[in-house]
Structure formats: structure tokens, C-alpha cells
Image (tube, rainbow, N blue to C red):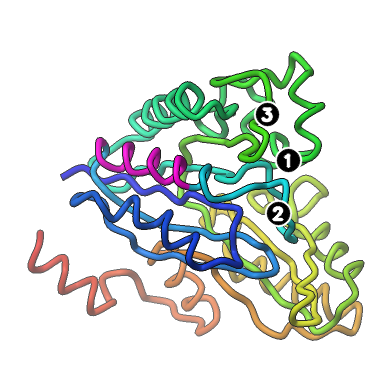
């Protein structure tokens, strides 16, 4: 069996009925399974994790994008998380008996179909990027939906697929292949966004922090606090525990407590084990010591 994971992000986190309609598109496929989905009111964003056989997940993703295009209008959308499309980003990740090259090819086929059939400009990113300038999703997304109407006029930002004009309600979308990513957020006991911004700056790569961390400060107005919102693009080289401890130390500088943290979507078992090993100071522990993992390996090897 060949399996590929995809984690599409949709610019809707307040209307559950809309998100469920988008998810239902993938549930029509027998060989595609929804592993997890979540919504965030302040971010006004939802993240869906699904896995499936290559051919079916490719078609399922397109159907989800089509439904999102029908139901989400960015002209009336606002939220704390940066966004440029109704379907904002679609990554493909190799899971079982598949390669990064296969995921790259799938991303290109899906991107081309979105451009042709839905008239949405598509930008290839990460491993699928058509140039080094397009590898970084944040660089593509800069300016967001509102700024893209002018940005797309620059020849440098000609889409890889689709029209040279922003879709009036669905914006643009990034599609690509990548390794596992961990969406990790830390909530701070203050409503001062400047503090969150300073801490985000301390840990993100572009401003001198960890090589595989992208971070921004976000206001959670409904909760009256702020958040350091992050993507860990390589958890092996920029591990969760090291980033978290740095944020705690930075927060202490400003006299601010860390209230809690959250992981959006799913994470590899190895990331959780490495975090546990660090905090419990375990010297001899690995995936084989996890009973569920051992049972699966024993019965399905």
C-alpha cells in the first residue's frame, strides 16, 4: 500500500457547518481517511489532516478546494492568522512506500487542475517550488489576500498555474510537497502583543532564532491574551522542547507567564518521544518501548 498525507488549511474557523461540508468531500473516497481536523475562532482558520492512496487523495483534495471556493469569501473574512486564499495552503507529505518526488508530481497536477478548472492562481512552494524565491510559504503569502491584487501584477509573482488575476473571492493558493511540519502555539499570560512579537522574533529563523522555526505574535482577543504561533518545519533539528524552553526564558524577561501550549493537527510519534525523553531525562527509550507501537509492529510486520 502507498500512502500520502495532506494537511490543507482553509480560511474558516467560525462556521462549523462550512468546515464540515468541505470535509465531507474527502469522506466520499473509500481510500482516504480523515485523521484529524480543528477550527480556531481567533485565527479564523481550520486545519484538516487526511491520509490516503495517491490517486484518491489527489482527487479528494481538489474536491475540497472546489467546495471551499464555493463556501468561503475572503472579501468578508478576517482573522489573526495571515491568509491569501479560501484554501490557503495544500501540502503533500510522503508517508508509506512513497517518495518526495511522487508528492511533488501530485502537487503539480493538483495545482494545474485548480488553476484550470477553478480559475485560482496557484503557487508551488517548498520542495515543489519553481524557484528558490518561492520555497518559503511566508514569502509567497506576504501581503495576504488584500495585497495580492497588486502583487500579482509583478512579473516576479506570476503564478505557476492559473490566471494572472486574483480570484475575487477565493484569492490564491500555495500547493507543494514537504516533510512533516508541527504547528505549535504557546499562549502567554498577557494581552500585550508587543511581547508576543518580541518573543516570536527571538525564536524564528529569519530574525536570528532557530533554523527551522517560523513564528509570529498573535492576539487572541476572545481570551484576552496573546500567542506565539509557530510552524516547526524540521522537528528533528529544531525540537519542540528546545523551542518551548526558549520561549519560557524569553517570557520571564518580560515578567510574563506561559499559560499553556497547543499542537494543531497531528505530530510524528518520534517528536513526542523526544520531548518526553528530554523532560524526563530518559537515557534509554525509543519507539519500540511504546506498547501500541510494539503491538502494531508485531502483528502487521
- Tell me where residue 296 appears, x and y as whole percent: 16, 68
Q: Mark 1 points at which residue?
A: 145
Task: Give the image quarter of residue 295.
Answer: bottom left
> Callout 3: helix, strand or loop?
loop
Task: Give the alpha-carbon distance from disc 1 to disc 2, as whole Å.
Answer: 10 Å
Q: Give the range drawn in magenta.
A: 55-67
| 202 left or right, relative to 159 | right
Residue indicated by mark 2:
77
Of callouts 1 and 2, which one flags the residue occurring earlier in the amino acid sequence?
A: 2
Residue 40 lies, with reference to residue 225, above or below; the image says: above
Q: In the rendered image, which quarter contains the N terminus?
A: top left
Picture layout, residue 185 above or below residue 2: below
CB under 8 Å between discs 1 and 2: yes
| Circle 1 SS class | helix
Question: Between disc 3 and disc 2, whose residue precedes?
Answer: 2
Per the image, the residue denoted by label 3 is 166
Amino acid at each position: 500500500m502507498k500512502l500520502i498525507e495532506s494537511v490543507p488549511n482553509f480560511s474558516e474557523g467560525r462556521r462549523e457547518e462550512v468546515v464540515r461540508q468541505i470535509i465531507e468531500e474527502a469522506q466520499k473516497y473509500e481510500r482516504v481517511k480523515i485523521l484529524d481536523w480543528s477550527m480556531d475562532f481567533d485565527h479564523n482558520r481550520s486545519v484538516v489532516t487526511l491520509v490516503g492512496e495517491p490517486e484518491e487523495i489527489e482527487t479528494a483534495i481538489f474536491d475540497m478546494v472546489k467546495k471551499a471556493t464555493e463556501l468561503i469569501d475572503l472579501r468578508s473574512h478576517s482573522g489573526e492568522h495571515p491568509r491569501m486564499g479560501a484554501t490557503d495552503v495544500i501540502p503533500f507529505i510522503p508517508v508509506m512506500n512513497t517518495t518526495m518526488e511522487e508528492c511533488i508530481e501530485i502537487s503539480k497536477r493538483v495545482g494545474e487542475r485548480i488553476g484550470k478548472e477553478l480559475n485560482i492562481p496557484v503557487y508551488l512552494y517548498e520542495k515543489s517550488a519553481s524557484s528558490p524565491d518561492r520555497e518559503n510559504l511566508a514569502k509567497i503569502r506576504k501581503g495576504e489576500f488584500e495585497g495580492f491584487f497588486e502583487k500579482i501584477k509583478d512579473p516576479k509573482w506570476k503564478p505557476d498555474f492559473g490566471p494572472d488575476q486574483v480570484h475575487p473571492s477565493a484569492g490564491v493558493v500555495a500547493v507543494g510537497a514537504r516533510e512533516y511540519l508541527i504547528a505549535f502555539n504557546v499562549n502567554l499570560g498577557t494581552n500585550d502583543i508587543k511581547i508576543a512579537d518580541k518573543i516570536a522574533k527571538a525564536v524564528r529563523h529569519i530574525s536570528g532564532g532557530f533554523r527551522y522555526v517560523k513564528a509570529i505574535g498573535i492576539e487572541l482577543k476572545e481570551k484576552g491574551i496573546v500567542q506565539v504561533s509557530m510552524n516547526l518545519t524540521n522537528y528533528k533539528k529544531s525540537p519542540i522542547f528546545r523551542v518551548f524552553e526558549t520561549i519560557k526564558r524569553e517570557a520571564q524577561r518580560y515578567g510574563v507567564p506561559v499559560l499553556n501550549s497547543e499542537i494543531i493537527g497531528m505530530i510524528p510519534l518520534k517528536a513526542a518521544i523526544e520531548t518526553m525523553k528530554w523532560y524526563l531525562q530518559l537515557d534509554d527509550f525509543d519507539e519500540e518501548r511504546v506498547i501500541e507501537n510494539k503491538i502494531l509492529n508485531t502483528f502487521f510486520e
